[in-house]
Image (spheres, grey):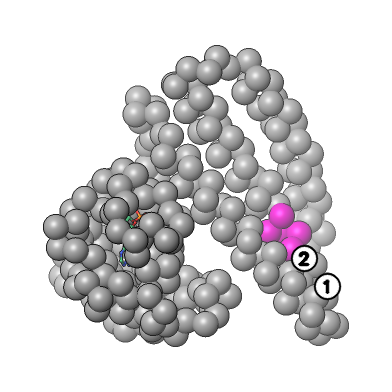
Amino acid sequence: MKINNIETTLEAIRTLGAAHLVHNSLNKEVAGTEATGNHSAEAIQILGHELKTPLSLIKIYLQMAQRLSNGNSDQVSGILEKANVQVDTISRMTDDFVQKFRCPQSGRSLTFHQFDLVDLIRELLLEADQLYPEFVIEFNGSESVVVKAERHRIKQVLNNLLSNAVKYSGGLKDISIYCIRSSEDVIVAVRDFGIGIEPSLCERIFQKAFRPDTLAVQNIEGSGLGLFIVKEIIDEHGGRVGVSSVVGEGSHFFFSLPVIY
Ligand code: ADP
């Protein structure tokens, strides 16, 4: 996000005031809510939604500070960049949490926009340089693929697949992302050379909260929600998800989306 002028900054500060008010009314709403399953789920939906504004504002302030410090101190710049990466992590975790407790009856309506999927992958790779500096992540594929989708949800899919490739890398630091288009759809694959998955488990890992009962997996932190969320998002977009994997050699996770042109 670019901060152009003082009006934008003032607007951001005004919104921060509004965010405080929302926060207060949210407290009341949560406090007044009975601890039934549906109400708790609803409160989490509200909380997830309301966290978005203050998180976006923190990002704006970090970027303003980054601009002010530019050229003056590499150390300050590095710290601000790290804080920025952490804000992105909290946003992602919030999205996952909200998705887990989504009320089935709330019926979210999707807002699709056209965007270049390859641009999005390049954005993800830049962020990955910050998040996983020890990994070598290469991109192969088309120059440009326009899709109609919810951009931030597709980014969440890519983030989940990439963070899994890192988590289950088994110490091998190479990861590849492919983006291959045909006349009707585009396939994106995230490939790692890590621990791999038993063939009998390849379908079950997309189920809600499923984690294999193996030592290799149990030693790695996780909730079993990431792939469930990936599948839900891609299903909502009319695409497909899948995996091909060999134990001890690595995995290809892929999804498809319809293309516009
Ligand atoms: P989590 O990683 O929190 O357990 P996920 O839903 O993202 O949840 O993944 C479910 C399971 O699928 C993981 O516990 C792991 O066993 C397996 N898995 C996911 N991605 C990979 C991968 N790239 N390599 C090996 N196993 C994977």
Q: Quadrant of residue 34?
A: top right
Q: Nearer the viewer, residue 245 or 77?
A: 245
Q: Position of residue 55 (x, y in %)?
A: 65, 50
Q: Residue at x 44, y 22 (%)?
A: 37
Rendered-image quarter of ligand 1: bottom left
Q: Position of residue 235 (x, y in %)?
A: 25, 48
Image quadrant for the C terminus?
bottom left
Q: Residue at x 55, y 80 (%)?
A: 133
Residue 59 lies in the magenta stretch: yes
Query: Mark 2 is on which residue type?
Result: Met
Q: Which residue is mark 1?
A: 68
Q: Secondary structure at mark 2?
A: helix
Magenta part of the chain: 58-62
Q: Quadrant of residue 145?
A: bottom left
Position of 187 with respect to 38 (left or right) is left
Position of 162 with respect to 82 (left or right) is left
Q: CA distance from mark 2 to mark 1?
A: 6 Å
Disc 1: CA contacts within 10 A as few (<14), some (14-19) or many (>=20): few
Position of 146 with respect to 78 (left or right) is left
Q: Main secondary structure of the magenta part?
A: helix
Q: Do the CB atoms of the residues marked 2 and 1 lie less than 8 Å apart?
A: yes
Disc 2: CA contacts within 10 A as few (<14), some (14-19) or many (>=20): some
Query: Which circle marks residue 64 in the picture?
Result: 2
Q: Is mark 2 within 8 Å of ligand 1?
A: no
Query: Mark 1 is on which residue type?
Result: Leu
